[in-house]
Amino acid sequence: MLNETICAIASASKEGAISIVRLCGVEAYDIALGLSKKSSIHPRVATLSYIYDNCNNPIDSVIIIYFKGPNSFNGEDIVELQCHGGVMSASMILNRCLECGARLAEPGEFTKLAVINSKLTIDQAEAINQLILANSEKSAKYLAKHLQGSLKKMVEEMRVSLIEALSFSEVCIDYADEDLPADTIDRLRGKISKIADNLNYTLKASVAREGLFQGFKVSIIGKPNVGKSSLLNKILNFERAIVSPIAGTTRDTIEEQLKIGGFVVRLVDTAGIRNTQDEIEKIGIEYSIKAFNDSEIVLALFDSSRELDEEDREIIRLINSDESKKIIVVFTKSDLENVIDKTVFSNFNTIEYNKNEQPIEIYRALEAILDSSYDFEGDILINKRQIDAARNAYNEVISSLKFLETLELEFFSYHIKEAIIHISSITKPYDNEEMLDSMFKNFCLGK
Ligand SMILES: Nc1nc2c(ncn2[C@@H]2O[C@H](COP(=O)(O)OP(=O)(O)OP(=O)(O)O)[C@@H](O)[C@H]2O)c(=O)[nH]1
Ligand SMILES: [Mg+2]
């Protein structure tokens, strides 16, 4: 438990109806008594009071709520002082807390204490942090599920299974002379393979949905002059990029954020891709390829008023090179006479468009892809740290299976132990005691 007292303004530093100053730690309750001149504050009851300055003048009328540890959000004594909004009352009350011996909390310190005091697992704390910064309804929905502990439950089940497998293997090593039941290895293989499948499934689903939390990237690509910047401007509804009849107008990638349906999207206009000797344009084209590689969804533009040429074919090769991306082919300049051969695009979702109309069809196609592809009922990992941990665990589990086949159980145990360490790091660090408990509980051979 914390042997000091921390404080901070817990609400946003803007105008609003109320602001909240939070006190937490060993003297939180006494400091609140001193500031309010009350003789006692009942836990979990909204108590109306004044807070006074050091000359006994009232600073503000507040609601005090006292959460007595360990029955608080982070297990410590917490007092919340709900004062009138804006920043002034809250800053004056915060200063009084500091004068009375509290220190300013570090960023995230209240939640860190919740993890230290086992009130939250690490993934739940991360979900809180990401929920505060969430920029779309869909990501908020996943984060709320994490807060409820859905990922924790899934990780916990895998971890328990791995610990059982480890303890089983350890017992087999220790009691090598004993006759093992014939189906032991089969059962172990079944258990571990199931974990590998689950991990792989969760990893794939999570990597595909990384954009839910940072925004999905949609790149607009095509050869020069097909109307990429015109389309960007139309989707954004303002003149963001320079448009001109000169091929090679856009030299650098231009990125803007917008919301499509319940999703945040980062829309990127790129330099037209072609063979060029111009050094600066060459660099711009490298950025275009990178934007294509980094995006989940691609709007590939072709000028329908012109025959396909080698530059277009280069774009066709590019969009055929990566099956994981969702591609929408847009035939631009549909207001002009159509000469392009559209049969080449029979396996793509295609849309005709010209700059004189609103890009409603393109918008709808994007919304449909986002809705159908990225909505998911299962559990997903919400950040790179969790994805890396799951990927490491998966690799260890796969390695362990090889040693199970050759019955090299020491190596099998080693990889399972590494897998446990990685998977546990998603929620709470692995404790060796757990394995020992499991080992003695389930596999005592009566010796
Ligand atoms: N008629 C017609 N002209 C268009 C349309 N879209 C774009 N243009 C024209 O085509 C030219 C090129 O448009 P941009 O939007 O700059 O093309 P871009 O693909 O960004 O070109 P780069 O930046 O050079 O790669 C401009 O003169 C536009 O006015 C369209 O739908 N119809
Ligand atoms: Mg352009």
Image: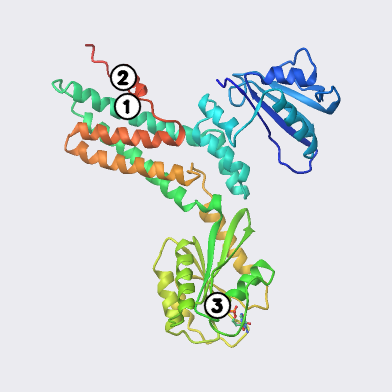
Residue 384: image location, x then y, percent: 46, 47
The mark tally for this picture is 3
- Which residue is denoted by mark 2 in the rendering? 442
Residue 316: image location, x then y, percent: 43, 75
- Which residue is denoted by mark 3 in the rendering? 331
Which of the image's four quarters has the N terminus? top right
Quote the CA–CA distance across marks 1 and 3. 58 Å
Q: Which of 7 and 374 is in front in this view?
A: 7
Disc 2 marks a residue whose amino acid type is Asn
Q: Residue furthest right?
A: 57
Q: What colouring does the structure picture have?
A: rainbow
- Which residue is denoted by mark 1 in the rendering? 164
Quote the CA–CA distance across marks 1 and 2. 8 Å
Horizontally, residue 280 falls left or right of residue 406, namely right
Label 1 or label 2, whichever comes before in sequence order = 1
Disc 1 marks a residue whose amino acid type is Glu
- Residue 98 in view, yes or no: yes
